[in-house]
Image (cartoon, grey):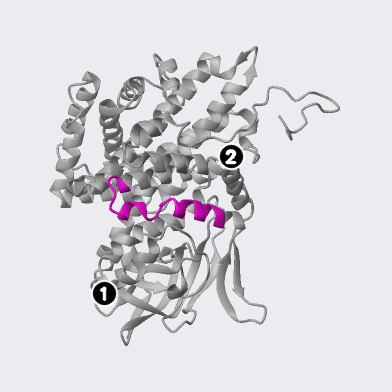
Amino acid sequence: MPYAPRSHLATHEVTNQPDPQARDLWQSDAALRRWAGQENRAALAAFGRAAGSEEMREAGRLANRNPPELHLFDRGGRRLDEVRFHPAWHQLMQLGLSHGYAACAWEGAPGGHATHAALVYMLSQVEPGVCCPMTMTYAAVPALAADAALAALWRPKLLVRGYDPASVPLVQKAAATMGMAMTEKQGGSDVRANTTTAARDGEGWRLTGHKWFCSAPMSDGFLTLAQAPGGLTCFVVPRWTPDGRRNAIQIQRLKDKLGNRANASAEIEYHGAWAQQLGDEGAGVRTILSMVHHTRLDTALAPAGLMRAALAEALWWARGRAAFQRRLIDQPLMRAVLADLAVEAEGALALGMRVARAFDDPAEAPFARIAVAVAKFWSNKRCVWLVAEAMEALGGMGYVEDTPMPLLYREAPLNGIWEGSGNVIALDILRALARDPAAGAGLVAELQAATGADRRYDAALRDHLARWPGLPPEGEARWFAERLAVLLAGSVLIRGGDAATADAWVATRIGSARGAVAGAVAGLDTDAILSAV
């Protein structure tokens, strides 16, 4: 191997250490190829090849080791309110946007949301923080439909397959991104408690107040909520005003986060910031929920990507590392652990991709509304567990920053918190079922579609419907959401997944043939499961 590191050292020979390798994120992932469908496979293959390259993996490492820096003023003391990123961040943004991360769902091709979901899943394995501004841009498009003029202004540049990081007015941009600033200190998820105010200023508005979380603060515009005379209203706040001045958006500080380090999240204040109304006055929550609905799709797919990355790292280590005269992958207990993790990872992927396909079908919109919340709730709860177990499979090396495992572990809780934490999502599921009978009907139809293939599944579904013939009490919302999730994923796996993986899911997730920790299972066909990864 030319230019390889020296393994013969002065005191010892380096052996029994697997060689790091670039990994094609499409070709190496049989589960993804199973669930991605037939549309746009060539595009997904091209992205998986590029994103999995050593160049992009190194970009991910550099972006995380060199976090964004806040620049409030220029050298002369004039306000800038800019965030500057390492060149690797811009390299990853170019990769994602040029392959249609934000655009492909809105270009009219079949399977657009499913293609987008697969891109989220793959890019999350390389550098998950960079997904945030691209997800916001993707999700802003349907919200902008509430105003034809604003859609005509922003949509063409949000859907460019390219990236322009310049901090200049929108008219000078080749491509644009959109962020979000909703929550405030006193309310958090309770956005109706917001105190930011909006006052008329000719054809626009002036906003005054603060936002505790501003996602992607270097975006070209932001969807935000403020109290207008007619009630809480949604606005588009551009970074630059129409006359070419910096808008009165002041960044207070960047959040010092546990993970997601490559990405900037900010606290901001509006000091009479110029804005345009989006949607009806007083209908701010309803208007911005269209954006939240689509960001939730990504928060359901991102944990599946993190799980896949952790599983792939554990498999690579187990196949290349020996202990006690046997490769780790050949030892029965390790095989049980890895097979158990593989079942969990595929369940998350299968459920997420099924939900994405519902986004592609207008007839399935009611099902998509409820299923995306179910998938987000469950996959994020399981992500932390899986990443920790995969880290343990590497032993002490899994806890070292030279590997991707610490990044994945820090990232694992994030999507379960953002865009609605567990309690918020569980209660949203109950509200959606109470308000929209079509959502409940679509969910039941999806669950019943798998009946007749597995007696254990059929019995569990009957038990679920008997336990909760209507909605559960609020205190049981998490239990209800969990059972919905494992049954829904089981339905998807039974109908379209690998047979051994589906059987294991029903036995160990829907049934009770397991303990509480990874690998505490019996009777899994580990050969079949691991060969289908």
Query: What numbered label is drawn on residue 219?
Result: none
Q: Circle 1 is placed at which residue position? A: 231
Tell me if 293 is positioned left or right of 29 in this view. left
Disc 1 packing (10 Å; few <14; some 14–19; many ≥20): some
Q: Quadrant of the C terminus?
A: top left
Label 1: which secondary element: strand
Which quadrant of the structure image shows residue 530?
top left
Q: Quadrant of the N terminus?
A: top right
Specify whether residue 402 is painted magenta: no
Query: Distance from label 2 to label 1 (Cα)?
Result: 46 Å
Q: Position of residue 505 (x, y in %)?
A: 34, 25
Label 2: which secondary element: loop
Q: Nearer the viewer, residue 263 or 521?
A: 263
The amino acid at mark 1 is Gly
Report the number of numbered marks.
2
Q: Nearer the viewer, residue 128 or 432?
A: 128
Q: Circle 2 is placed at which residue position? A: 404
Q: Residue furthest top?
A: 325
Which quadrant of the structure image shows residue 289?
bottom left
Question: Which is nearer the N-term, disc 2 or disc 1?
Answer: 1
Question: Which residue is rendered at x = 36% and y = 59% of the image?
Answer: 189
Q: Position of residue 181 (x, y in %)?
A: 41, 66
Question: Which residue is rendered at x = 27% and y = 26% of the image?
Answer: 494
Q: Residue furthest bottom?
A: 202
State the extent of the magenta-drawn residues as a range: 90-112
Q: Where 13 falls versus 354 (above or below)?
A: above
Question: Which residue is rendered at x = 17% and y = 47% of the image?
Answer: 363
Q: Nearer the viewer, mark 2 or mark 1?
A: 2
The amino acid at mark 2 is Pro
